Image (spheres, helix red, strand yellow):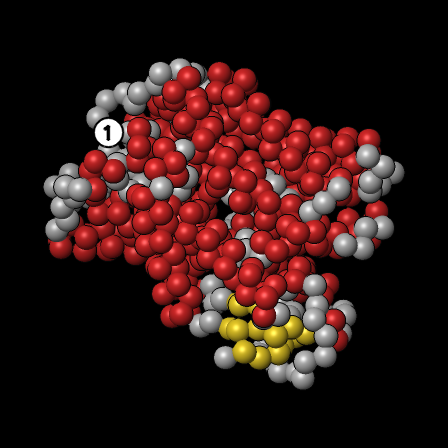
Amino acid sequence: MSQYRASLPIAGQTSFAPEARRHPTEDIESALRSDVARAGSDTVGVWIVRLLDFPPSASMLVPTVDLNQRQTLILAILELFLGRWLNRHVGRLRDWNIPEPVTGGLVASLVFGLVWIALDVQVTFTMDARDILLIVFFTTIGLSANVRLLAAGGRMLAILTLVAVVNLALQTGLGVALATLMGANVAMGVLGGSVGLSGGHGTAIAWAPTLAEKFGLPNAMEIGIAAATFGLVAGGILGGPLGRYLIRRHHLKPAGDAHTSVGFTYAEEARLKLDVDGMLNTLLVIAIAVGIGTHLNALGAGLGLRLPQFVTALFAGIVLANTVPHLFPKLPWPTGTAPLALVADLALGLFLAMSLMSLQLWTLLDVAGPLLVILAAQAVIGWGLMVLVVYRLLGRGYDAAVSTAGYFGLALGATPTAVAVMTAITKVHGASPRSFIVVPLVGAFFVDIANAVTIQTFVGWLAR
């Protein structure tokens, strides 16, 4: 039911009489939740403390329609159906490897944007299940890993990690350089660099107050959220075509007959068979791995090492997948099975559908002038770097093409976007198990840590 409320992080459902329409990018709660898993609990806490220093004003009141968890989940499932239907009937979408959740999620986000513009009402969602889906998805990625794949991907992992670290500096440096050339505030360049792109919404929200204070950019929050939204959309749309270009340009094909790590090829879907015992075994192992990951997370927090829970779930899955089958060789194990691939596909699809439908695409209406130039340049130059440099560094083969396309989705958007891009590619062209180990590991373990150092370095240098 439509109501008016104050939009503050972790706020209650306090109702107010309508006084004024606020700018949509001030809906900090939705933006914060959209990347809370990547941002980490410390970021959330710092941001809440900052906001509680200021009482809500009339400009922060907004008419909203709040959807509960059941309604949110129903919409996400309908979006997946819509995305699958559109990709099946609009040949270009499948040919260009556009992920099904991206197709359905963006259509839903556009609809909710039109509701905001036409009816002056904002739709908000309950995202608790989304965070659980993210943990389940990364657990399935860990359970899909084995020693052979980890060893085979060692060189690629090291190279892509180095590429990612260098690219963080390139993104921020490009943003600052363009902002300076156009006479804009340099903080806009930082937000349009690794803060909003590789960092995403959580990083943009965490750094916006600091950048606003140090560089006198009062609308830093709006700029950061707009940049992160642009990156998430661009990564989901451009990553697939990049993979298609590399595969066709170099006439690439997958080696061997490995099964896809997430979902199935379109040819396999038509003859897919599942059994109850296999599904129950998969769900049991996932639940155990998630539980172990939760305890590891608590143990790390007690030692002062704070990590997002999906990272420890990923680690728990890797450990289990590489120990239990060797200790108990007769025990049924889900690695490489259809039930595990199906659960991974559904968890990723529903997570992305929820994330994309909650995007405030209308914030992109404010992307004009210098910020638009910066973001467009990031996408174009990033594409060129992927084709001319990254693909070659990763070895030039089919796995290199899939990993390059996935990393492009990561560099602009987020790790789930990267995996969705690779899933869309492998559904058409065939499996690439090594890519599904390397890219998620880079996104989960290395990018956020390196990005924090990169941002701090640039901010300290520019503030002198």
Could you tell me which residue is drawn at 50 percent across and 26 percent down? 160
Q: Does residue 67 lie above or below 44 as drawn?
A: below
Residue 308 drawn at (x, y percent)? 50, 51
Residue 162 drawn at (x, y percent)? 56, 26
Q: Does residue 348 lie above or below 66 as drawn?
A: above
Front-most of residues 273 and 230 = 230
Q: Is residue 36 left or right of residue 350?
A: right
Front-most of residues 166 and 63 = 63
Taking the image as drawn, is residue 204 in sight? no
Front-most of residues 342 and 111 = 111
Residue 332, image quadrant: top left
Q: Quadrant of the C terminus?
A: top right
For this orientation, the residue located farthest to the right is 464
Taking the image as drawn, is residue 435 in sight? yes
Give the residue type that dot 1 points to: Ala
Q: Is residue 437 left or right of residue 146?
A: right
Element marked by disc 1: loop
Q: Badge 1 is on which residue?
A: 258
Residue 256 drawn at (x, y percent)? 23, 22
Could you tell me which residue is drawn at 61 percent across and 74 percent down? 63
Crowd class of label 1 (few under 14; some 14 to 19; many from 20; radius 10 Å): few
Residue 78 drawn at (x, y percent)? 35, 59
Could you tell me which residue is drawn at 35 percent across and 59 percent down? 77
Q: How many marks?
A: 1
